Amino acid sequence: MNEAQKNRLTISIFGQQYTIVGKASPNYIRMISGYVDEKMREIAKSNQRLDSTKIAVLTAVNIADEYFRLKQEYDELLKLIEDEE
Amino acid sequence: MNEAQKNRLTISIFGQQYTIVGKASPNYIRMISGYVDEKMREIAKSNQRLDSTKIAVLTAVNIADEYFRLKQEYDELLKLIEDEE
């Protein structure tokens, strides 16, 4: 990929600045960053003794859980289509 | 949900211990924790100046990206099925 095709964006998550570089659109990058920020704030709210690292790790575990649940649904849907053909 | 139906598991991610409580199986919890641990180590390797919090936040952003990409594929697949009916 050409360097010129990449977007560079500075976003804020849980009060810290991050520079994200990638070919995704700025809107998409803002959307996923906002998603992570929101999840971190939810976890921080219900576990007030956790430090930022633990909040971020538990957020990652939480989103990985959502990913694998969706992956299972996706695979089942795909199997359904293949069985029909 | 009954408290007795929940599993409580202590897992290690990026050198720190976490207690995960939920109805998911211990194997599933270990799998998603291992996934997060592996991603964190990859990001740490390619960005050696980042602290643990930033590594964890970028891991969460990374997994959220995978989640939303899969979500889009899933929605397209679902639309395909609905259009056929």
Image (cartoon, coloured by chain):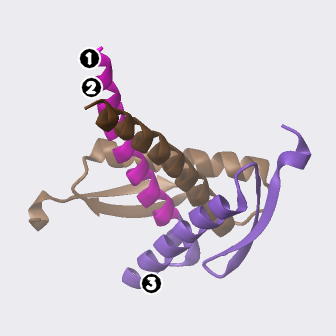
Chain colours: A brown, B purple
Task: Residue at 37%, 45% (x, y): give it.
Answer: B70
For the N terminus of chain B, give its image quadrant.
top right
Chain under numbered label 3? B
What x and y, as percent, mark residue A36?
52, 50
Q: Tell me which numbered mark, 1 or 3, is placed earlier along the sequence.
A: 3
Kindly identify which numbered label has been placed on residue A46.
Answer: none
Measured in 3D between alpha carbons, the distance from the residue under mark 3 to the one under mark 2, in whole angstroms, is: 45 Å
What x and y, as percent, mark residue B10?
77, 70
Secondary structure at badge 2 equals helix
Q: Is residue B81 above or below residue B1?
A: above
Chain under numbered label 1? B
Main secondary structure found in the magenta portion:
helix
Q: Tell me which numbered mark, 3 or 2, is placed earlier along the sequence.
A: 3
Residues in magenta? B57-85
Chain under numbered label 2? B
Measured in 3D between alpha carbons, the distance from the residue under mark 1 to the one under mark 3, in whole angstroms, is: 50 Å
Question: In the rendered image, is residue B5 in sight?
Answer: yes
Q: Which residue is mark 2?
A: B80
Kindly identify which numbered label has been placed on residue B83.
Answer: 1
How packed is label 3: few (under 14 Cα within 10 Å), some, or many (20 or more)? Answer: few
Q: Is residue B11 above or below residue B64?
A: below
Q: Is residue A1 above or below residue A36?
A: below
Task: Residue at 71%, 72% (x, y): give it.
Answer: B11
Residue B52 appears left or right of B39: right
Q: Amino acid at mark 3?
A: Arg
Q: Which residue is mark 3?
A: B49
